[in-house]
Amino acid sequence: MNTPRNRCANNAPRFRRDPKTMSDGSEQARDDAEIAAVDFQCAVPVTGAEDDDERAEQPRRRRDRPTPSGPVSRRSYRRVTNAFVVLLGLFMMGGIYSLLASASSAQQTARQPDVARGRQLFEISCITCHGANLQGVNSRGPSLIGTGGAATYFQMTTGRMPAAQQGPDQARKPTTFTADEINDIVAFVQSVAGGPEKPTGDLRNDAAMSEGGELFRLNCASCHNFAGKGAPLSAGKIAPGLNDATDLVLYTAMLTGPENMPVFSNNQLTPDQKKAIISYIQSLKSMKDPGGLGLDRIGPVSEGLVIWVVGVGLLMGVILWIGAKS
Amino acid sequence: MPTTDELDGMTAEEAMFAGANQDGVQIVHRRDRFPIPGSKVEKRAEFAVSLAFAISFLAAIGFIIVFIAVPFEFHMPGKGSQTFAIYTPLLGALLGISLLAVGVGAVLWAKWLMPEEEAVQDRHDGASPVEEQMLTSATLISGLEDTGLARRSLLKSSLGLAGLGLGIVPLVALVGGLIKKPGRQLQTTLWTTGVPVVFSNGARVGPGDLQAGGIATVFPGVPGGTTAADSPTLLIRLRPGQVVRPRRGQAGFGWGDYVAFSKICTHAGCPASLYEQQTGRLLCPCHQSQFLVTEDARPVFGPATRALPKLPITVQKTDDGSTYFIAAGPYRESIGPAYWERR
Amino acid sequence: MTATPTAAQFEKPRTVLGKSGKALEDRLGIAGGIRKQLNKVFPDHWSFMMGEIALYSFIVLLLTGTYLSFFFDASMGEVKYEGSYTPLRGVEMSRAYASTLHISFDVRGGLIMRQIHHWAALLFIAAMTIHMFRIFFTGAFRKPRELNWFIGITLLTLGVVEGFAGYSLPDDLLSGTGLRIADAIMLSIPVIGSWVSFLVVGAEFPGTEIVGRLYILHVLLIPALILGLIGAHLALVVKQKHTTFPGPGNTETTVKGERIYPIYAAKAGGFFFLVFGVLAGIGGLAQINPIWLYGPYNAAQVSSGSQPDWYMAFLDGSTRLMPSWETHHLFGHYTIAALFWPTIVLPTVLIALALAYPFIEARLTHDHAPHNLLQRPRDVPVRTSLGAMAITFVMVLFISGGNDVVAKAFDISLNAMTWWGRIAMLFGPPIAYLITYRICLGLQRHDREVLEHGIETGIIKRLPSGEFIEIHQPLGPVDSHGHGLLEYAGAPVPKRMNKLGSVGRAVKGFFRPVVEKAEIQEAIEAAEAEHAERTQPAERPSVGAGIDD
């Protein structure tokens, strides 16, 4: 028997928001949230993957919805509209995401963080590995005491936490929390564990951008590359590229030293210096390439590829053309 | 060779054939591409070639206009005109089109409009006839005999000496001007006992400046310390639980949970600075030598053979009561890549 | 048809051209010599044009390089940058780096010149490389052309050195890291290493002189050498005449093609513009060596993903793959650095092998005869396989030179990439040898088979006995058993029916066959017949059966 839930593609997130914990949800809102949660679990639409015969015997069921029992044509029509709705949804998500990303600082001040709600979310999503008192759970997850809200913010915003599997090397992935939820958890962790706080305000220091560049090349470029492209570390670990990193993510990463990244305390790199580094990185990312296509800014490797594939390739065509009998 | 009278009566093409024959070239196949002059196909071909040249002209004009008229000054986003981002691509595209069009035009001209031709030429190479060789060698031998070098051995050896001497002179002059004695420069750095440990901006480094799992590039706080190529040093504050097993004779080189290693890779001299704070590995980005800090920066992978030299550090209390790191002595080993005299 | 000027006109020329021609001839007497050069026959095969790409890139390099030298300041003196590239304003840097930024951002059109120059350098060496492959695999280096092979290898080596010196000039963080390694390589030379390093650099690295010294090497010494050697290279081609593939008119004693003037000259001249045009296009559309992203050189800084330009990558790769073998305590307390083997010994051996190859082959094959005809790679399986082996070896090193980029792009462990390289470096070449050898034999066998049994026509016939057979078209006379009598002559054997038409005027268009109108076709044939009558009293070299030239 396939229920929608266990038919979900196995790359669905491991945890699920429980609507019952939502303090301000009305009955209707709860229902919607539940549907949303189910939809959310089945992030990959399962209809296409199903066997048609099986579908005929086992009409698709949704918990709160009437079971569709129309003729086949209507089902396929529904399938098309479903796909369309999913597409539209994805499209809108993308639009909303880009809006959020561009206006992240405005969005941060949208709502005051709620410590109580943060605790609730923590107890659902984090407690298994980090323990009820954030003391960590042996062989599951480290203690969070003294790590601070900055670390929590970095780990959750970049999707590293909740972890896909245990271990010190977590890869970036899309986060499953809203910005408000993350802020609530951040506030909760900060209130209990202490440590470096998530910074607020403008995190740029454009006036000192070139000093930031010097500091970037001294402290950061060795792993993250001069153009912020990232690099492999020893034995399969990587230093990620900085392309997707926001100001806050960069700042909290420097401050807390996530994964294998060294910690850069405020005595070593003052907040102004950190902001200067951020200014440099972000200006590099936003800057247009003056010399044409940037070739991913990775330097001689892509240049060598271009001269052999495009340059030599084109000229081989040319000599074949000139040399052809006419 | 045809006589002038014969040549007077020939067309240019016929005379060309005669000339080619003279040069050992047989034109075995020659035919006009368009035997009917002025046919539609010929006109079309001519038009196509001319079109290529015209395109080249237009692109060149475009290049000149863009070169002069488009603002090329660099600006950050939002700080001014962004046309610089299309300036160079436009120039490249227009110049490329202009040059390519001339090239295409010339090749098409040769392929479409010039006569089709196949010529065969005799190679006439290989060695000269034996008579020729004999005459030349006789000339050489006779000349040598005239100089009498074979008989006059004193002359020969003294000339040889002169040649030898003058041959060495430029070598000596060049090397003598360029040579520098390495001395002990490769064995020494600016780090000596009591030299303050400073950040790149010259600020002194104290034990409170790094957090556990932190790393900083530090320099000797002496004039020229931040630019000397052999002095950059990695100051590492270990994570709780990480212990460095010191190498022989170098116990006590660290201070508390701080250790300091040369940043210059012992393999080829790149700054080995990709530090993984949890595993304690240091990776050099040039040739991927990996050093394990917790085993005193011993090389564990890649081409490096020697551990990174370790700088002995200690702290110094200043008058205002704050404590700062100083070097407790120089590096004991040579910094950076190996060389013949390195011990 | 224009008539030749009469002898009287030669005595008293009227036109400006005629007058100046006579003035020159009266003084130099070069009419015969010039005509000989104009009439020189150059064979027509696409693979003979690779060296020209290198030649034309070099001309582009000279043009753009001269322009750049008007602005570049080869000094390591420190300045504070005040130009228009904001993210570096106020940073201390060398004058070399600052002036390169100046060319890139503050000289109108300076950036495209820089970029064309750098792309042309990459193409120059790439073209020399493929040209060398052509020479090698077709046996063009054999007697009497060993000297030109030497000159070619020397040119390739000089080109690599010239390129390295050139990209080190801007004194940026990437090339400075390369120079640091170059200094370590000099240090690694046994006995005299530290003295060599101090002699070249002028002090302990980085000193204040290396950029100025590299500059004079880059703009004067090495280009002069390259120019001289290119002259010698071409002079030898003119003297010895170009090699050709065997075919009608192409024998050990004759060469067939087009005369230099005018057709070949038009094609070659057009080709120069095509090479320049491709370089200009890439130079404007694709960014190269963005030194402003790298930052000025600083011995304490480094970036991950630091690679040299492509032609140096194999040395970086060999260094990365080298195990940690260093000789310590030699004769008491001397050291041979690990760096010595992959960066000094290996390239020396590679160059020495390349230089010696013509003699090695002649010694092993006992072939000391002069050769003007080229060989098809399949006909010399040992040489072809050796070449494939060498290419595989260098390719593994080359990929390992960028193994961090590969590891990052494909999410492979860096250590695994290193081990892959170490293993592939040892086992790849022999495997390549075996595979290439078998392919060569297979191709040879197929050629013989077609010569013996003819081309598959695709026509299936049923015999009275019920058996189905495919009809084969013999390529020439057959014996009583229907077996072809043609010997393999080293020329391509047609394998498909449509190849057989290529002896005549079956012109293939790019997408569709070119068919000329009936009346034109008739006129062509008439003209051809007339022409053949006029120019070909003697026998025309008969076109060998089915040889597709």
Image (cartoon, rainbow, N blue to C red):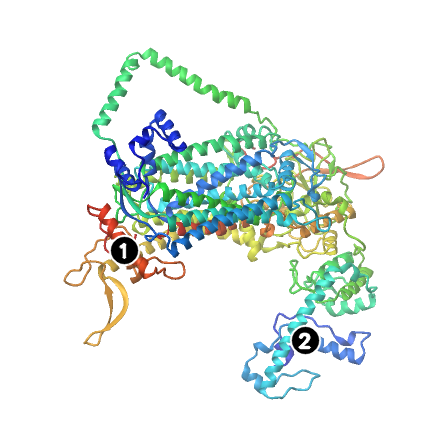
Q: Which element carries disc 2, helix, strand or loop?
A: helix
Q: Where does residue B236 sit, x and y in percent of width and height?
A: 69, 45
Most foreground residue, A25 or C328: A25
Front residue (pair C31, A108): C31
Residue at mark 2: chain: A
Q: Report in which chain the residue with disc 1 lies.
A: C
Respond whether the residues carrying marks 1 and 2 are from the same subunit: no
**Crowd tier of the residue under label 1, counting other residues whose Cα lies within 10 Å: few below 14, some 14–19, many 20 or above:** some
Tell me the number on the disc at residue A39. Answer: 2
Q: Quadrant of residue C410?
A: bottom right
Residue that numbered label 1 is attached to: C525
Image location (x, y in percent) of residue C226: 45, 34
Q: Tag 1's secondary structure?
A: helix
Residue furthest right as drawn: B320
Point out residue B135 in the picture as x, y percentages from the top left corner: 23, 23
Which residue type does callout 1 highlight? Glu
Task: Work out whether residue B326 can be spotted.
Answer: yes
